[in-house]
């Protein structure tokens, strides 16, 4: 059939469809008039909503296209297909064509068709299993399970389970007999009835639902139209029935679509060919009158074009290619990612025992494992073997037994020099045939693969740029001139060279270029002249030389676009969300904040709320502290009221801001729609497992507080009472670990942390402005010791923070809690490291508590140079921590003996740290043991290859952690006379001799001097803390090109050195430099030394 005949047939079918549509539109118009007369005014809500949406669409068409839509004149593609016996797909295709002419409006709607599966057809024919089982039980009175399974087989099992579930059959457990209280005549096989209805009416969803609602179905019970009208109520029961049959795999549901066609004002039965342009020929002969001219809408906006950007590497690759082509180079054959070891190593004279050919550096192919190229003749292989084994062509060789099998192994290409070797081998063949050399310039830019650790400058897959020139009698001067011309095009005008070694080039040079922006010399490539044995083994003569150079594509791209991390070349998706694997954590934290601000990391809505809560609390606390301190300095009535007003207004703003954040909608990291924090919190509370956990927390806490109150009434020792709060915290936290509800735990710890700080702020405000209100003070004063007598009461806050921070750090910075989608990382908590959490939790809640109890039971002997700590207390700490880590880690990791060495180190160093520390250890101790676990894990990871754990030098670990114990003030137990002598010699302006008498005025003056010095000590500690943070960051930035092993080893020592430097600077800035001899380390003596007796 010719093309013209096909077009004529299509036009004829289109004309027929237009006539059909005209007829259907007229019929629908008449039907709508009759329906309007009989309409009682009750409209369906769903139809109303649909009509409203359509009316908006019609209004938009009228505004944009100038079309009037005749709503009362419509039909459907299904109706036309059934009535006129035309294929439905064909009808929809022609309707879409008419839609482009705006003759009609085409609304695509969907419907389902229902078909029986093979199993459903079997049940329709033979009956359902449940009916067969009931029938068998009734006919065989008191039949047993064994009889049923024996006679009915698999159908009996299926039917029995269904009947037992529906309680239509009872099972007597004593004699295992089945009974049914129904008569056979009263039972109908409804499953078979439903399947029969679906089989008949599955093609029409509306009709099918109507028949399914009538359980006493007969074929002529109701007219189809009457049945449809009776089915306008809720269809939930039928939907459940359909879903039940689908779950039983008796039914298959297929989704289909049809066109709802509505007539427009320009509808007509004839079609003229539309034209968009009128040329002079159409105007000359007035032929344009025969055609329809397509209307243009000059007011409608065009479609947005989502165009992509060219990748930076692609841009740089194109630049390099343009440079090579401009210099007269031609591209070598590439894209051969899988290469044989022969071309990748042996042909380049890399020995077979070279480290680069190990699994640690090269990716070997598993299937096919070996390969050898067909065009490599035996002569070339023999030449390669001879040079490797004994040496030739001026080379001494490697003097080992070369194996052909090793050279056949397939690898992922490690460098593009394999391409150069192949190209030179082909030229050697041409050289043998022609007898003369043809000068050539080749280049290649392609991917290579190496098994390297991922870091800021290395990836396992990257690109290499390679260029070579082959000619007679060319040497080093030609190479340097070519490199100068090549790098000049890149923008590097200053070059210098450094000798190096390559197995296949001699001489070899590293290329350094001067970068104008950074004012630094940077390594930009490698170069050399191919060795004689490489060329002569192929068949070239001695006068032929090859100069070559290569560089990576990624490095110049990073330099050009000022990219510090190679992973950023491929978007934020590859940014490691893993702080624990990096030592320079502050830099990473800033990077994480930057990504969050640019919406490249989408946090959870609760994380956003808690962050805003703490930020506002910090600002509010700062205002309260300022007002309290100012009120102490200026105690005038007017100014006191002024500060009260400031605190009152800031309190109202603080609560309003957080209430707004609680109810405001945010975009969540999981849900597509915006939700508020209150909705998330309610969902957490109403979850079954969550509210059971919360209820358990409340019961345990109340019970424990009642018990602690009874201990206070019995006047038990304060340290003993205080340690019960450690046990209470451990019980609640570990309960969350067992139930695997760390996400709920961190939320409640966050709110508890906020509550503790807020209550302490309220206490201080009441102390300064409302001294008569002492409710909070009375409660807290029962539990505080000498360390909390003055200033802020922070012991309980430190305890909560010490447990809270390690869990929070792992939850936020663990990369497994981030879902990578395109160029965004979405936060979603999914993984908990319980061994990491217990390393901090057990030391402070169990180890520290047992150390205090052991110290009270066995106060002697004391450990020298400590804050009155006993040997028994440290022993109790070590034993209790070690055993608790073993016991309480077993539920989470049954193979806990793998970590026994880590548990031992945590316990022993935790005991030493607890003994020598003089400050409140509730915060510092758990963070210290948490860092021990991280450092050991990092060391074991960095010193292992291919998951084969290697032993780390125990002395190395010992010295790393021993550096933490240099702080400690070497203060022995002192009596009152020693204290007086120390104070007189250190703090008084004039030294008091031993013969001088000390009176109360001397001692008071000395103690006043001491009190003034405490303020300076606080500043010195702050400078020490800043030094411990900033100095390691500075050192690591200087060692940024060193490997991770070196960074891990030097980090603890730079931390200690930073503490010393910070302390030294603090002494100078605070004017305590002359008194530096007073302190061995942080410029402080333990406070308890001065209040004894």
Image (cartoon, rainbow, N blue to C red):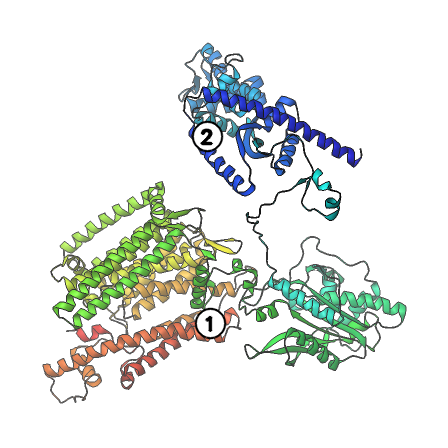
Name the quarter where the C terminus is drawn: bottom left
Answer with left or right where residue 849 lies relative to residue 995.
Answer: right
Q: What residue is pinned by disc 1?
A: 1049
In primary-sequence order, the first of circles 2 and 1 is 2
Residue lying farthest to the right in this orientation: 434
Residue drawn 59% across and 27% down?
Answer: 78
Name the quarter where the N terminus is drawn: top right
Indicate whether 194 appears above or below 763. Answer: above
Q: What is the x, y in percent for residue 969?
A: 29, 76
Indicate whether 222 appears above or below 298. Answer: above
| Rendering quarter of residue 183 | top left
Q: What is the x, y in percent for residue 437?
A: 85, 72
Q: Which numbered mark, 2 or 1, is in the foreground of this view?
A: 2
* SS assignment at label 1: helix
Q: What residue is pinned by disc 2?
A: 47
Residue lying farthest to the top in this orientation: 185
| Rendering quarter of residue 539 | bottom right
Residue drawn 78% across and 66% down?
Answer: 423
Q: What is the x, y in percent for residue 817?
A: 45, 54
* SS assignment at label 2: helix
Asked whether residue 724 is in view, the answer is yes
């Amino acid at each position: 059939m010719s093309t013209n005949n096909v077009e004529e047939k299509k036009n004829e079918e289109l004309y027929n469809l237009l006539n059909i549509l005209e007829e259907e539109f007229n019929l629908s118009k008449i039907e709508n008039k009759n329906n309007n007369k009989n309409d009682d005014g009750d409209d369906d809500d769903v139809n109303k909503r649909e009509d409203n949406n359509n009316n908006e669409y019609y209004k938009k068409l009228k505004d944009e296209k100038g079309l009037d839509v005749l709503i009362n004149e419509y039909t459907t593609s299904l109706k036309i297909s059934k009535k006129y016996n035309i294929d439905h797909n064909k009808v929809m295709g022609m309707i879409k064509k008419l839609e482009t002419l705006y003759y009609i409006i085409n609304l695509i709607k969907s419907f389902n068709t229902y078909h029986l599966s093979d199993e459903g057809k079997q049940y329709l024919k033979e009956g359902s299993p449940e009916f067969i089982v009931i029938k068998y039980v009734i006919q065989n009175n008191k039949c047993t399970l064994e009889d049923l399974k024996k006679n009915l087989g698999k159908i009996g099992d299926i039917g029995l389970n269904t009947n037992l579930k529906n309680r239509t059959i009872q099972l007597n457990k004593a004699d295992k007999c089945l009974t049914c209280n129904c008569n056979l005549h009263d039972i109908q096989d409804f499953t078979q009835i439903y399947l029969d209805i679906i089989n008949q009416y599955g093609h029409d969803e509306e009709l099918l639902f109507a028949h399914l609602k009538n359980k006493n179905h007969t074929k002529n019970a109701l007219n189809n139209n009457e049945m449809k009208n009776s089915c306008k109520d809720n269809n939930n029961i039928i939907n459940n029935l359909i879903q039940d049959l689908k779950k039983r795999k008796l039914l298959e549901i297929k989704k289909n679509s049809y066109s709802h066609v509505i007539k427009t004002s320009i509808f007509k039965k004839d079609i003229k060919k539309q034209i968009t342009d009128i040329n002079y020929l159409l105007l000359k002969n007035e032929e344009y009158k025969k055609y329809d001219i397509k209307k243009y809408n000059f007011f409608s906006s065009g479609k947005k074009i989502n165009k992509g950007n060219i990748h930076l590497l692609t841009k740089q690759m194109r630049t390099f290619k343009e440079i090579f082509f401009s210099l007269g180079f031609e591209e070598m054959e590439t894209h051969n990612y899988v290469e044989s070891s022969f071309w990748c190593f042996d042909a380049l004279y890399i020995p077979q025992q070279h480290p680069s050919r190990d699994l640690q550096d090269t990716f070997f192919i598993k299937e096919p494992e070996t390969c050898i190229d067909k065009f490599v003749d035996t002569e070339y292989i023999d030449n390669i073997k001879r040079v490797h084994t004994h040496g030739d062509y001026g080379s001494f060789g490697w003097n080992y037994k070369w194996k052909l099998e090793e050279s056949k192994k397939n690898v992922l290409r490690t460098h593009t020099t394999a391409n150069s070797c192949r190209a030179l081998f082909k030229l050697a063949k041409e050289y043998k045939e022609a007898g003369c050399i043809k000068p050539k310039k080749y280049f290649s830019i392609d991917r290579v693969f190496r098994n390297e650790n991922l870091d800021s400058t290395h990836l396992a897959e990257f690109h290499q740029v390679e260029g070579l020139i082959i000619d007679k009698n060319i040497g080093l001067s030609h190479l340097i001139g070519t490199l100068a011309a090549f790098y000049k095009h890149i923008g590097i005008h200053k070059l210098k060279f450094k000798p190096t070694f390559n197995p296949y080039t001699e001489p070899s040079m590293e290329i350094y270029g001067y970068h104008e922006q950074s004012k630094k010399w940077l390594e930009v490539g490698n170069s050399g002249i191919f060795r004689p044995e490489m060329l002569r083994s192929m068949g070239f003569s001695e006068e032929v030389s090859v100069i070559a150079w290569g560089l990576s594509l990624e490095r110049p791209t990073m330099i050009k676009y000022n990219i510090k991390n190679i992973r950023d070349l491929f978007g934020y998706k590859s940014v490691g969300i893993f702080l624990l694997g990096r030592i320079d954590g502050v830099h990473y934290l800033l990077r994480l904040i930057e990504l969050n601000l640019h919406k490249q990391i989408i946090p959870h809505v609760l994380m956003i709320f808690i962050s805003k809560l703490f930020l506002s609390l910090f600002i509010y606390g700062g205002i309260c502290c300022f007002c309290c301190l100012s009120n102490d300095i200026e105690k005038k009535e007017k100014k006191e009221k002024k500060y009260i007003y400031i605190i009152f207004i800031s309190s109202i703003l603080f609560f309003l801001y957080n209430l707004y954040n609680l109810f405001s909608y945010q975009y969540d990291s999981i849900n597509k729609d915006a939700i508020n924090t209150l909705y998330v919190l309610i969902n957490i509370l109403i979850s079954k497992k969550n509210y059971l956990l919360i209820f358990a927390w409340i019961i345990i806490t109340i019970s424990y507080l009642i018990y602690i109150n009874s201990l206070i009434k019995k006047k038990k020792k304060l340290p003993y009472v205080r340690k019960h709060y450690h046990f209470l915290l451990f019980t609640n936290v570990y309960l969350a670990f067992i139930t695997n509800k760390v996400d709920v735990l961190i939320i409640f710890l966050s709110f508890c942390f906020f509550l503790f700080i807020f209550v302490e702020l309220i206490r201080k405000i009441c102390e300064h402005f409302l001294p008569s209100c002492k409710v909070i003070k009375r409660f807290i004063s029962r539990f505080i010791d000498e360390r909390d007598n003055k200033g802020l009461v922070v012991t309980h806050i430190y305890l909560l923070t010490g447990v809270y921070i390690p869990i929070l750090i792992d939850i936020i910075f663990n990369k497994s809690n981030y879902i990578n989608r395109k160029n965004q990382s979405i936060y979603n908590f999914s993984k908990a490291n319980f061994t990491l959490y217990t390393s901090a939790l057990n030391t402070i809640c169990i180890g520290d508590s047992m150390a205090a109890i052991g110290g009270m039971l066995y106060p002697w002997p004391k450990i020298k140079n400590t804050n009155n700590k006993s040997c028994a207390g440290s022993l109790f700490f070590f034993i209790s921590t070690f055993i608790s880590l073993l016991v309480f880690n077993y539920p989470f990791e049954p193979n806990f003996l793998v970590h026994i060495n880590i548990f031992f180190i945590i316990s022993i160093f935790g005991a030493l740290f607890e003994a020598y520390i003089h400050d409140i250890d509730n915060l510092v101790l758990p963070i210290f043991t948490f860092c021990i676990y991280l450092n050991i894990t990092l060391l074991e990871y960095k010193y292992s290859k291919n998951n084969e754990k290697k032993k780390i030098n125990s002395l190395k670990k010992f010295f790393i952690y021993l550096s933490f114990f240099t702080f400690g003030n070497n203060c022995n137990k002192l009596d009152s006379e020693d204290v007086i002598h120390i104070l007189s010699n250190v703090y008084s302006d004039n030294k008091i001799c031993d013969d001088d008498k000390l009176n109360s005025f001397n001692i008071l003056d000395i103690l006043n001097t001491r009190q003034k010095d405490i303020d300076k000590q606080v500043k010195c500690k702050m400078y020490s803390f800043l030094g411990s943070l900033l100095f390691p960051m500075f050192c690591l930035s200087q060692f940024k090109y060193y490997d991770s092993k070196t960074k891990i080893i030097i980090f603890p020592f730079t931390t200690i050195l930073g503490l010393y430097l910070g302390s030294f600077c603090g002494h100078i800035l605070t004017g305590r430099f002359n008194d530096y001899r007073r302190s061995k380390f942080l410029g402080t003596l333990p406070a308890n030394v001065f209040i004894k007796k």
